[in-house]
Amino acid sequence: DGGITQSPKYLFRKEGQNVTLSCEQNLNHDAMYWYRQDPGQGLRLIYYSQIVNDFQKGDIAEGYSVSREKKESFPLTVTSAQKNPTAFYLCASSDHELHTDTQYFGPGTRLTVL
Amino acid sequence: GQNIDQPTEMTATEGAIVQINCTYQTSGFNGLFWYQQHAGEAPTFLSYNVLDGLEEKGRFSSFLSRSKGYSYLLLKELQMKDSASYLCAVMDSNYQLIWGAGTKLIIKP
C-alpha cells in the first residue's frame, strides 16, 4: 500500500530539548512539505522540498530544520529555538508531474512540550 | 496580503444539504482545493477546481468562480460521518497552497 507515514503519533518533550519528527513516503513523489496546525488557524508551511538535497523555507521556518537526503524521507527537527512548539505537525507529498499537484498528507504527529 | 475566508462553524441535519463557502484573495491562482479533516486526523483530498463551474463527485460537489474569488463545497444527503472540518486552500502564483482556517461542520440527527 502506498502512502505517507509519520511517527510517532504523540510526542512529549521537555522544554529546551530538540526533537525530530519522521516522515516517510512510498508514493515516489518528488515534493514533500511540513505544515504546522494550531487551533482556529489554517495550515502554515514550515519547510518544503521539491527534490532530493534541496529544500526551501516556508512562512514559519524559524526554530525548525529539515533534511532531504533520500526521496522517501523528509524529517523535521523542532529545535529549542522554536518559542511555541506545541502543535499538530503534518507532513505531505505531491507529484509535480500531475498538473493539479495535489498534496497528500500523513497522519500527523501531535507534539506537546512540557 | 493573501487571504482565505470561510465560516468557522456550521450546523446541519442528517439527510439535508449544506453549502460551505470560501472566498479568497491571493497572488495569482493555480487552482482551489477542498479537503476534509476529522478531528485529530490528517486532511484528506476532496476536490480540485481550476476552471469556473461545478465539479460533481458523488454526494460532494465543488463550484468555482474565479472572477468573484469564490468557491463553495456542496454536501448532499448528509451523514453523521460527514461531521468534520472542511478546509479550503488556493494554490498561488508560486504554486504554494494558502489555507483557510477551516469550517467545522456539525451534523445533528
Image (tube, rainbow, N blue to C red):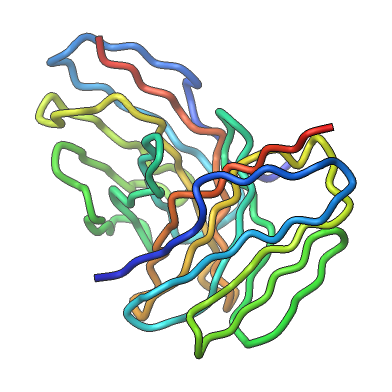
**How far across and down, in percent of the image, does residue B55 sit?**
75, 75
Q: In the picture shown, does residue A85 fall above or below A96? A: above
State which quarter of the image contains the C terminus of chain A. Answer: top left
Q: Is residue A43 left or right of residue B72?
A: left
Q: Is residue A60 left or right of residue B43?
A: left
Q: Residue B88 or B7: which is nearer the viewer?
A: B7
Q: Residue B15 or B28: which is nearer the viewer?
A: B15
Q: Is residue B107 left or right of residue A111?
A: right
Q: Residue B109 or A114: which is nearer the viewer?
A: B109
State which quarter of the image contains the N terminus of chain A. Answer: top right
Answer with the quarter of the image where residue A74 lies.
Answer: top left
**How far across and down, in percent of the image, does residue B33 sit?**
57, 65
Taking the spot 29% from the left edge, 24% from the top edge, the residue there is A86
Taking the spot 56% from the left edge, 44% from the top edge, the residue there is B9
Q: Residue B2 or B5: which is nearer the viewer?
A: B5
**How far across and down, in percent of the image, does residue A13 sit?**
28, 12
Q: In the picture shown, does residue B22 fall above or below A71? A: below
Q: Is residue A100 left or right of residue B80?
A: left
Taking the spot 26% from the left edge, 42% from the top edge, the residue there is A66
Q: How many marks?
A: 0
Taking the spot 65% from the left edge, 43% from the top edge, the residue there is B105
Answer with the quarter of the image where residue A5 lies.
Answer: top right
| Residue occupying the far bottom of the picture | B67
Q: In the picture shown, does residue A107 fall above or below B85? A: above
**How far across and down, in percent of the image, does residue A56 sit?**
24, 59
